[in-house]
Image (cartoon, rainbow, N blue to C red):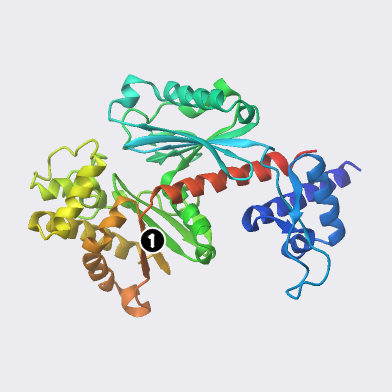
Amino acid sequence: MARKVSDSDSVRRQNRGLVLGALRVEGPLSRTALASGTGLSHASITAITQDLVEQGIILDLEPGERADARGRGRPATLVGFNRQAGSAALFEIDVNRARLSLVDYGGILVDRLETQLTPKSFAETPPTHFLAERLQQLQQRNPEHAKIIQRVAISVQGILNRDGQILKWSPVAHIANTPFAAELAEQFALPVSLHKRGRLLAEGARWLDPALADASVATVFVGSTVAMGMTFRGQILGRSDEGATEFGHMNHQPNGALCRCGMRGCVEAYASDYGVLRTAYSVPETATPAPAVPAQEYEGLIARAEAGERAATHAFNLAGRAVGFGLSRMMAVFDPSHILIVGPGARAFGLMQSEIYAALAGSLVCRVNGLPQLIAYRDEREPVFRGLLMKTLNEIDQTDFATRA
């Protein structure tokens, strides 16, 4: 008997997860559309949605479109997420800034705090205190949502340990090897998860462009660092499943320019904003990289290169060459149909693309299969935020609400 009860509970959780997953992907749907999309019977959908409505997780919305294009039949009643069922706090931390967003269960932004970071920020204020202070501020500003926060998720630049609980290395100064996630979880009595920025880039790209949902895509961030996220036929790849980890720290030039990570010759040492800055000003390659490059400084270099200044043009040529050869090596083991260039470097894509294409054209895979489609996506914040948002809401769907008794 116990086995039958256990199996029944497992099926129930799975079916509730299917319904919540369909609504997360498609948005509000009729019960008929849910049955069609999930493969569950109409009777099962009716019972599951009734349960979810009674628990306040979803609700009946205004009538949608009529039953067919000719306008016959009764209007379909749609079900969608109850935005008041829960909320999530999302931190995005990179070299130059920290951003905290509060979103409701429907994925709508409620409030946001943004703080500029310097190389001394986490030396002056320990990471746990810094994050806790901003989370408390957000809670005080939004008391109703503060009571229903389900999870805290943190996007970070750097290398996580294999179980994803500790940041082992980061270009963000004074944040690595500190147990800020565990301390934050204990202080607020909430689940706190760490997510690598490169993987979120890939996750976000799938959500922003439905045409890429089932494609093999390499999403490359070029800016304060160089990072990559990868999807293989719609599945996110990362360290835990032997996928991309540190594209920016792939060796481009043995014993070459000094990288911020301390190694020499990395792709990032040439293609990041500090690499371009160093080349443009003819600073020796062995010089310590700038800890941070103001956005206006990088934009100024782009303007100078577009105006034809040789030093700036040369710097972006070297950056494009480093990215291009990195991609050509990557394509020896992974052949994506699309390559997305995101971040501040996407605004300089026109200055780098000839070198990127030249490097790719020299690879056997591209010679045989042709070049992948390269797309410059200028707003780097949106893919990371969207990836973090959807990953966190999916965890709430499947871990918190699909299993609710």
Residue at which label 1 appears: 340
Left or right: 30 as drawn, with respect to 297: right
- In the image, residue 360 sits, relative to residue 176, either above or below, namely below
Q: Name the quadrant of the N terminus.
A: top right
**Most foreground residue, 379 or 391:** 379
Q: Find residue 194 and report its horizontal and vertical position in percent.
A: 49, 37
Write the residue at 45% across / 23% down: 128
Write the residue at 46% across / 53% down: 242
Write the residue at 48% across / 59% down: 231
Q: Name the quadrant of the C terminus.
A: top right
Left or right: 218 as drawn, with respect to 89: left
Residue type marked 1: Leu
Q: Find residue 35 and report its horizontal and vertical position in percent.
A: 78, 62
The image quadrant of residue 326 is: bottom left
- In the image, residue 373 sits, relative to residue 197, either above or below, namely below
Q: What element carries label 1?
A: strand
Question: What is the crowding at mark 1: few (fewer than 14 residues within 10 Å), some, or many (at least 20)?
Answer: many
- In the image, residue 307 sits, relative to residue 146, either above or below, namely below
Is residue 281 in view from this perspective?
A: yes
**Most foreground residue, 366 or 205:** 205
Q: Residue pushed farthest right?
A: 1
Q: Find residue 79 and report its horizontal and vertical position in percent.
A: 74, 52
Write the residue at 41% across / 53% down: 244
